Image: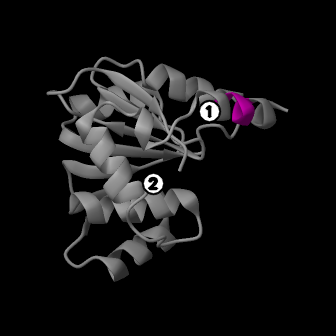
């Protein structure tokens, strides 16, 4: 029941690129999420692959995803896994404490991206997501329903977007 209600709420709140007023997010949505062809059937992995390509990310961290790691190595030359600071982290169930630890350990830099699949998997995951996007070091967050994306961009005002893709 939670997933059905949360999806209906998502549909009511969400917008497409026309509701985005941040130039950075508008470019990301139009040129990366909408503008490139589908690269994988899993929507979360598809966004990961498109983001790696769009941002030319070289340092990726995946949490126990050997198939995705193989796919990334096959698709992108010179990509480095688990070599920090990370350009992109792909990790489900990221808590505020996990995020704070990453900041303290220097695992993230300005322009790091966190991709979190399954933010609506259950109420606990959704609560973690809503707490996470309130963290002070997170400036841009995007709810795509099947995943959440967090950008570390010190030069940008804190904003949250709910985008249909």
Q: Could you tell which of marks 1 and 2 lies nearer the N-terminus?
A: 2
Say if residue 61 shows up in the picture: no
Task: Look at the image and name its color scheme.
Answer: one colour
Query: Looking at the image, which residue is at 49% across and 42% down?
Result: 16
Q: Is residue 54 visible?
A: yes
Q: Is residue 45 toward the left or the right of residue 28 in the image? A: right
Please indicate whether residue 59 sits to the left or right of residue 155 in the image.
Answer: right
Badge 1 vs badge 2, beta-carbon distance below 8 Å: no
Q: Nearer the viewer, mark 1 or mark 2?
A: 1
Q: Which residue is mark 1?
A: 125
Considering every residue shown, the one lying at the far front of the view is 18
Q: Can you give x and y, in whole percent of width and height, for residue 125 in the image? A: 62, 33
Which residues lie in the magenta part? 6-10
Please state the horizontal and vertical placement of residue 140, each as a whole percent of the image: 33, 30
> Main structural element of the magenta stretch: helix, strand or loop?
helix
SS category of the residue bearing label 1: helix
**Residue 63: image tag:** 2
Give the image quarter of residue 54. Answer: bottom left
């Amino acid at each position: 029941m939670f997933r059905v209600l949360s999806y209906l709420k998502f549909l009511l709140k969400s917008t497409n690129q026309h509701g985005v007023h941040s130039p950075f997010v508008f470019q990301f949505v139009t040129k990366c999420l909408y503008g490139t062809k589908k690269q994988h059937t899993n929507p979360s992995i598809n966004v990961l692959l498109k983001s790696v390509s769009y941002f030319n990310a070289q340092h990726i961290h995946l949490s126990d995803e050997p198939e995705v790691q193989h796919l990334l190595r096959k698709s992108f030359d010179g990509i480095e896994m688990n070599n920090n600071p990370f350009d992109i982290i792909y990790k489900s169930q990221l808590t505020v404490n996990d995020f704070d630890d990453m900041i303290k350990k220097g695992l993230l830099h300005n322009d790091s991206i966190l991709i979190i699949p399954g933010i609506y998997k259950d109420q606990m995951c959704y609560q973690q997501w809503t707490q996470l996007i309130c963290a002070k070091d997170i400036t841009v967050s995007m709810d795509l329903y099947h995943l959440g994306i967090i950008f570390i961009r010190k030069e940008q005002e804190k904003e949250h977007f709910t985008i249909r893709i």
